[in-house]
Each structure stands twice: as structure tokens, then as C-alpha cells.
Image (spheres, rainbow, N blue to C red):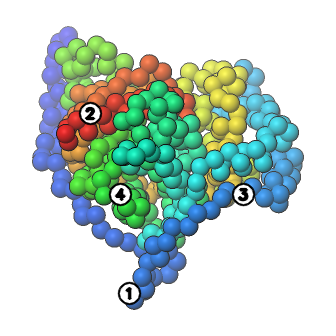
């Protein structure tokens, strides 16, 4: 038979399955924006939502520091396996060095000052206090800035954007032009950072997109840009879907697009018939890519099913919390770092950066509520909303070390983001792009926004 008949049979089987599943039907209609209430109890019909915006400062109290250090000193460590590097997760021996640094070298008060480098605010939306960092640039007479909402994901936080903010708000001193100036709003997803967690089930990316839209409206912005990675990519994409009259442009550095199965299968045999040669490695061979997903996605299954169970340990143990997050700062930054003694963390990161991100979770005790976001979003990820077409002007920054399942060729991205103005193949960088490569990401955002602005001239 050779290879022809197995291939023909496989293709016919897939096509039949796709027809039966309705894959060739028209894209679904976007759902209504809706409304909701996520605070304790019920919304009183006569009550008016408190729309005040309250400024606050982050404080790391002495009681918090002393309690944390006591827990670190009392950590029960265990012995790792010989020669395993980060293959089983964060090596216990490496974790001991992190504990020593956290205890003896991490400067809590200096980092508290750094956290407060930018202004922090809260406002109540749909019954929850929503936290956001808000940085307004210094403008000359007649100069206007462009409002930009940037959204984080898991296990990140608003802290991810601390290095990119000055590149966007002060472009003249950071490689940009006077036209590249932005007013930056970095909200925390409800249940993350300093945003109140939902008291009811159902807090998914659709809800957050609506809440973030209300936040931008409350800040006086009718037309604005949005940017995101990880869950932030999903949230801002839904903003572009449901709020197209407000979102001028959407820029993401992670893409959630279902691969076209027929092309995926045919390309396994004849990749050049499907995609340009430079894109083959993003999709084929399928087996090692699938193996990477299988080896690195255990956290997803836990968080998408029983997040509260593991939430008890991660809320109680700072070392457990740190190990859980540091594993992602290793493998999601560069999968090859699994083969290193330190998981690449010593050379790849300045330890204060991942520890500051970890401190955001520890100080707020909200790892459990953050992990619940996975369980709430599974129905969306496999539902109609993720199959809707995004029609607002869009841009994608494809970083080479991003988690393989979220690297999609430009051709496939265009099936969902039908008004794709820009697709950039980055020379380096991984999952935490804004913190890893702020200059590259800022330049790509600037270039994308210039293209959108040209459309409106």
C-alpha cells in the first residue's frame, strides 16, 4: 500500500469527523456583554455602585515579614534525586538557596519602596474592589497620550509590567518617539494581586473583560488599546470581541487558536504544502510538542479541577508557593532550562524579580483564588466564545521560547484574528515577555499602534 492509502484514509476520516462536529459551520455569534454581581450577598436594586477611585500604597508590615521569616526558618526540606536537574520540578537543593536568599538578602523595605514606584488604586466594580496601577505620562502642551490597558496572567501579576511601563510612558528617554507615548493602566484580575476575589463561582475571562471595560470607562476612556499575555491575552481578546467600539487595537504575546486538524495531519507528511518553512518547527513534528505539553501541564489539570485542595498548602507555605511559581519561571521562560542544575533561574533572572511576583501572592494570600480562574475558564476555552472571529485591528508578538502549544503560525492566527495588522517573530524571549524582554515588547507595541493610528488618519 505504501504511504498513500493510509494518508488518504486518515484524511477522509478526519474530514468526516470535522463535518460531523460542525467545524465547517459559520463562526458563532459573539455572546452579549452581560452584567453581574460578584460581591458577598446580593446586589440591592436600590443601591448605587460606589464609583469612587481610591489611591493606596503597598505596605509590607513588620508582622508580615516576621511571620514569613519564621515560616521560612521552619521549612521541612527533603532530598532530591541524583542527576535529575529540574526534571522532577524545582530541585530541593536549589530551593534551599532560594530560602537563604529570601531570609538574608531580600530587602523587604527596599522592595516595598519599589512596589510603590507607581501609583496604585482601587475602585468597586460589580461588587468587587478592583486594583490597578495607573501611570500617566508627563505631556507637553498640545500633546496627547494613548490609553493602553495591559493585562497579566498566571502565575504573573501587575508586577510583570514594571520594566515596560517607563518604555511606554516616557518613550523619548527609552528609544521611542513623541508619538509613542501611552497612559498605562495595569489592572489585577479579580482574585489576583490586590483585586478582591469573587465570592461566587463563574468569574471567568468574559466577566473580567467586561469589568476591565467598565474600568476604562470609569477612567474616562472611550477608545483605547489593550495588550496581554497568558490569561491577559484571552481577556483582552474577549474585550476586542465584545467591545469593538471601544478597543482601537489589540496586541497579544500569546495566541489561543485551535489548529486546523486537516492541515495539521497533512502537514505531518507534507509540511511545505501547508506552511512556510520558517513555521514548520512551531507545529511539527507533533510528537515532541505533544510530549512537552504532557510533561508541563500537570498544574493546568489540577487548577482546572480541584484548585482549592492544593490552595491550602500554597496559601500556608511560602516555600511551597515559591517552588510552584519558580518552576514556571524556569520552564515557561525556556523549556531547555529543565536540564540545568538551577533551572536557569540564576542566570536567567535577577532573583528579586520572581520573588517580588511571589510576594504579591503571599501578601494577599490569594493563590487559591488565582488558580480557580482555570476551573472557571475551561468552559470558555472549549466553548463558542473561543471560536468567534476577532475583527478589531490586531497584532501578535511571537516569542521563540513561549510554551509550544501557544505558538501559532501567522496563517493560522489569521483564521481567528481576521484583521491582523502585524505578526512579529521575536529573536528571543519566552512566556513572561514584559519582564524578560521589555524593550522588544515595547517596540512591537509601538509599531503596532502606529499602524492602527495610520488607519484612522
* Residue 103 appears in the picture as rendered: yes
Q: Residues within 10 Å of mark 4 (few under 14, many from 20)?
A: some
CA gap, disc 3 and disc 4: 30 Å
CA gap, disc 2 and disc 4: 20 Å
CA gap, disc 3 and disc 1: 36 Å
Mark found first going from the N terminus, 3 or 4? 3
Mark found first going from the N terminus, 1 or 2? 1
Q: Name the residue under label 1.
A: 45
Q: Name the residue under label 4.
A: 221
Which disc, if any, is residue 451? 2
CA gap, disc 1 and disc 2: 45 Å
Q: Mark 3 points at which residue?
A: 59
Q: In this view, does 230 lie to the left or right of 255?
A: right
Give the structural element (helix, strand or loop) at label 3.
Answer: loop
**Residue reaching furthest top?**
2
Q: Which of marks 3 and 1 is in front?
A: 3
Residues at circles 3 and 1 in contact by the CB criterion of under 8 Å:
no
Mark found first going from the N terminus, 1 or 4? 1
Give the structural element (helix, strand or loop) at label 2.
Answer: helix
Amino acid at each position: 500500500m505504501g504511504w498513500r492509502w493510509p494518508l488518504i484514509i486518515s484524511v477522509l476520516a478526519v474530514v468526516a469527523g470535522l463535518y460531523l462536529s460542525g467545524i465547517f459551520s459559520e463562526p458563532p455569534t459573539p455572546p452579549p456583554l452581560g452584567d453581574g454581581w460578584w460581591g458577598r450577598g446580593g446586589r440591592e436594586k436600590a443601591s448605587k455602585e460606589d464609583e469612587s477611585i481610591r489611591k493606596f500604597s503597598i505596605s509590607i508590615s513588620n508582622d508580615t515579614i516576621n511571620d514569613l521569616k519564621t515560616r521560612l526558618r521552619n521549612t521541612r526540606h527533603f532530598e532530591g534525586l541524583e542527576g535529575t536537574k529540574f526534571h522532577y520540578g524545582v530541585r530541593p537543593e536549589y530551593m534551599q538557596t532560594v530560602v537563604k536568599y529570601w531570609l538574608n538578602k531580600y530587602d523587604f523595605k527596599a522592595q516595598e519602596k519599589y512596589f510603590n514606584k507607581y501609583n496604585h488604586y482601587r475602585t468597586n466594580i460589580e461588587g468587587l474592589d478592583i486594583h490597578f496601577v495607573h501611570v500617566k505620562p508627563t505631556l507637553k502642551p498640545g500633546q496627547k497620550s494613548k490609553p493602553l490597558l495591559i493585562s497579566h496572567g498566571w502565575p504573573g501579576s501587575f508586577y510583570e509590567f514594571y520594566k515596560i511601563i517607563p518604555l511606554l510612558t516616557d518613550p523619548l528617554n527609552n528609544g521611542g518617539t513623541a508619538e509613542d507615548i501611552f497612559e498605562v493602566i495595569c489592572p489585577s484580575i479579580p482574585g489576583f494581586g490586590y483585586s478582591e476575589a469573587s465570592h461566587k463561582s463563574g468569574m471567568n475571562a468574559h466577566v473580567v473583560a467586561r469589568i476591565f471595560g467598565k474600568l476604562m470607562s470609569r477612567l474616562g476612556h472611550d477608545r483605547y488599546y489593550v495588550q496581554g499575555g497568558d490569561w491577559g491575552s484571552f481577556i483582552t481578546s474577549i474585550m476586542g470581541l465584545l467591545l469593538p467600539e471601544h478597543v482601537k487595537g489589540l496586541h497579544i504575546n500569546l495566541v489561543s487558536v485551535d489548529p486546523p486538524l486537516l492541515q495539521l495531519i497533512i502537514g505531518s507528511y507534507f509540511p511545505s504544502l501547508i506552511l512556510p518553512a520558517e513555521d514548520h518547527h512551531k507545529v511539527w513534528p507533533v510528537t515532541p510538542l505533544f510530549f512537552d505539553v504532557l510533561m508541563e501541564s500537570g498544574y493546568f489539570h489540577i487548577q482546572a479541577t480541584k484548585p482549592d485542595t492544593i490552595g491550602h498548602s500554597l496559601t500556608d507555605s511560602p516555600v511551597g508557593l515559591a517552588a510552584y511559581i519558580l518552576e514556571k519561571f524556569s520552564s515557561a521562560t525556556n523549556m531547555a532550562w529543565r536540564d540545568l542544575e538551577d533551572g536557569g533561574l540564576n542566570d536567567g533572572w535577577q532573583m528579586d524579580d520572581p520573588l517580588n511576583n511571589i510576594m504579591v501572592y503571599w501578601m494577599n494570600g490569594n493563590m487559591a483564588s488565582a488558580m480557580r480562574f482555570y476551573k472557571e475558564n475551561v468552559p470558555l476555552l472549549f466553548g463558542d466564545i473561543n471560536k468567534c472571529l476577532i475583527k478589531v485591528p490586531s497584532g501578535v508578538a511571537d516569542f521563540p521560547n513561549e510554551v509550544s502549544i501557544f505558538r501559532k503560525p501567522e496563517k493560522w492566527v489569521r483564521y481567528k484574528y481576521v484583521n491582523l495588522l502585524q505578526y512579529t517573530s521575536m529573536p528571543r524571549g519566552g512566556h513572561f515577555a514584559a519582564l524578560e524582554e521589555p524593550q522588544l515588547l515595547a517596540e512591537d507595541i509601538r509599531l503596532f499602534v502606529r499602524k492602527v493610528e495610520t488607519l484612522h488618519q
